[in-house]
Image: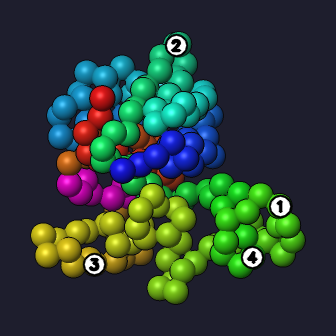
Amino acid sequence: MPEGHSVHRIARQFDRNFVGRTVAASSPQGRFVEGAAIIDGREALSVRAVGKQMFLGFDGDLWLRVHLGMYGAWDFAGEILVDPTIASANGRMGQTNQRGTNLDDPVLDAAGENSLSSIGAPRRARGRVRMSEQTLGLEEDDAFPPPVVGQVRLRLLTDVTCADLRGPTA
């Protein structure tokens, strides 16, 4: 179950990767077609996290409200900028003593993936998930944005970033 700190971390991801950019919004499963059409083509202006809710503000005084309840997740793909408070020289979180941290260097795990750019699992492993939970990595020449996997309720795109909301929402 996502807690408030997770929602704040997700909000920071949106701030670094979506705020100031025009988004393309869609509802791949059809549940939020009308809402996605309202924010499609608008610029994301701000993001706020309050408890387990995130508010993404758009031009035209529009807001997208997302409440992460019992389960649900945002998956990010593309060229993701990492929040500097979670990147450190030794891979641990921290807000002080950031000496030796080069924020331009990718933060890679043992498998060579930047798992900080995805909430919950390495980005390449999320690309294709089979019923047996076996995964295939995304090839370098795979199309962007990645194909919809699972029950994606809302998809937000910029020219280099994709965010999919999976699971139920309020």
* Residue annotated with mark 4: 89
> In the image, which is nearer the foreground, mark 4 or mark 1?
1
Which one is earlier in the sequence, the residue at label 2 or at label 3? 2
Q: CA distance from mark 1 to mark 2?
A: 38 Å
Which one is earlier in the sequence, the residue at label 3 or at label 1? 1
Relative to 157, does residue 44 appear above or below in the rendering? above
- What number is the disc on residue 55? none
Q: Amino acid at mark 4?
A: Ala
* Residue annotated with mark 2: 60
Identify the residue at horizontal 25%, vertical 53% (top origin).
Answer: 148
Identify the residue at horizontal 45%, vertical 58% (top origin).
Answer: 119
- The image position of residue 31, as x and y in percent, is 19, 31
Q: Is residue 109 left or right of residue 28?
A: right
Q: CA distance from mark 3 to mark 4?
A: 29 Å
Which one is earlier in the sequence, the residue at label 3 or at label 4? 4
- The image position of residue 106, as x and y in percent, is 64, 73
**Secondary structure mostly seen in the magenta stretch:** loop
Pointer 3 and pointer 4: residues touching (CB < 8 Å)? no
